[in-house]
Image: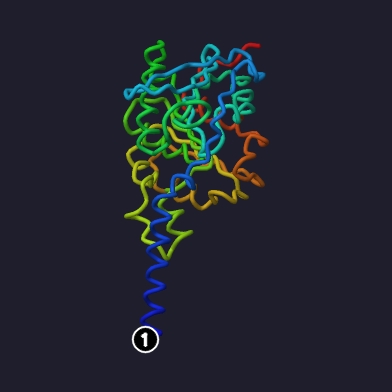
């Protein structure tokens, strides 16, 4: 029996070590920032300029903004867990070509912005970015909250706190907690996870028009995650299933056209872009 006791102790010790490693290293797993600050002059997006926001704890956040054409809304954009705002150059190009304004928050620890990433910090800074747009003269009816991947949780949480014309979620997750529980079923994930990003807990509080865009071949956040979130959401809502699209190539498909149709249907787009 001694060997059984010893084996049990070894397994228990390994379990505790694994749980501790997960706890202290989790943000390195959750967030994959590119910390390089890229100047707007280095990208080919007409009208793009940098906005420097200062947080309540005096950190500098480098954000990018291209203004909307008349009659078109501004998308307050929260990107995913990797890279930085510069990695979304193609999105800026397509969205601005369609006449949309795009204000992309530079997360803490990403793209030259100061500080360290966390769910609480992202949500707080999202409110700062929204307030900035309102201070610049935009009305709530001119702002569409947009989230990509992990940024969809930030977007949904913000949409429960402020007025907005609509909400667009690209490849949304039901929650980081559910993903972690699936990947580490043998560990006590819930009490150890710092950033749960429980989008599902907030989506039912949102009542503005909702568009969810999700690829059928998404290998990072599977289609079922977006479908579950859609089922939990209130009307009016639209689910756009993109056949053959993965997680990072949705903009190779005509999703911007779908966004225009959706926003026109809900009166958010009020005129056609005049070239």
Query: Which of these two is toward me, 107 or 163?
Result: 107
Using residue 133 as the reference point, say whether residue 32 is left or right of it: right
**Model colouring:** rainbow
The residue that appears at 60% across and 45% down in the rendered structure is 215
Q: Position of residue 230 (x, y in %)?
A: 45, 45
The residue that appears at 41% across and 72% down in the rendered structure is 11
Residue 207 visible at all = no
Using residue 149 as the reference point, say whether residue 123 is left or right of it: left
Residue 210 visible at all = yes
Q: Which residue is mark 1?
A: 2
Q: Position of residue 136 (x, y in %)?
A: 41, 11
Where the C terminus falls, by quadrant?
top right
Query: Which of these two is toward me, 217 or 17?
Result: 17
Q: Position of residue 186 (x, y in %)?
A: 42, 66
- Mark 1 lies on a secondary structure that is helix
Q: Position of residue 34 (x, y in %)?
A: 56, 34
The residue that appears at 63% across and 45% down in the rendered structure is 246
Query: Which of these two is toward me, 21 or 140?
Result: 21
Where the N terminus falls, by quadrant?
bottom left
Badge 1 density bin: few <14, some 14–19, many ≥20, Cα 10 Å: few
Snapshot quadrant of residue 214: top right
Q: Can you say whether 38 is above or below 199 in the image? A: above
């Amino acid at each position: 029996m001694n060997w059984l006791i010893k084996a049990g102790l070894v397994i228990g010790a390994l379990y505790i070590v694994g749980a501790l490693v997960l706890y202290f290293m989790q943000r390195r797993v959750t967030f994959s920032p590119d910390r390089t600050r890229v100047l707007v002059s280095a990208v080919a997006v007409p009208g793009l300029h940098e906005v420097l926001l200062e947080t309540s704890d005096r950190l500098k956040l480098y954000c990018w903004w291209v203004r909307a054409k008349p009659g078109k809304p501004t998308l307050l954009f929260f990107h995913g867990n990797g890279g930085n705002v510069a990695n979304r150059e193609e999105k800026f190009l397509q969205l601005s070509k369609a006449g949309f304004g795009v204000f992309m928050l530079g997360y803490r620890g990403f793209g030259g912005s100061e500080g360290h990433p966390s769910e609480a910090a992202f949500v707080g800074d999202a409110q700062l970015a929204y307030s900035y747009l309102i201070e610049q003269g935009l009305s709530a009816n001119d702002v569409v909250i947009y989230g990509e991947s992990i940024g969809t949780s930030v977007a949904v949480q913000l949409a429960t706190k402020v007025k907005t014309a609509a909400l667009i979620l690209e490849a949304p997750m039901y929650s980081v907690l559910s993903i972690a529980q699936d990947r580490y079923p043998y560990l006590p994930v819930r009490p150890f996870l710092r950033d749960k990003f429980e989008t599902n807990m907030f989506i039912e509080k949102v009542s503005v028009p909702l568009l969810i865009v999700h690829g059928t071949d998404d290998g990072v956040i599977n289609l079922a995650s977006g479908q579950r979130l859609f089922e939990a959401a209130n009307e009016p809502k639209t689910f756009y299933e993109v056949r053959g699209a993965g997680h990072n190539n949705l903009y190779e498909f005509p999703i911007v056209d779908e966004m225009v149709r959706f926003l026109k249907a809900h009166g958010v787009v009020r005129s056609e872009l005049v070239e």
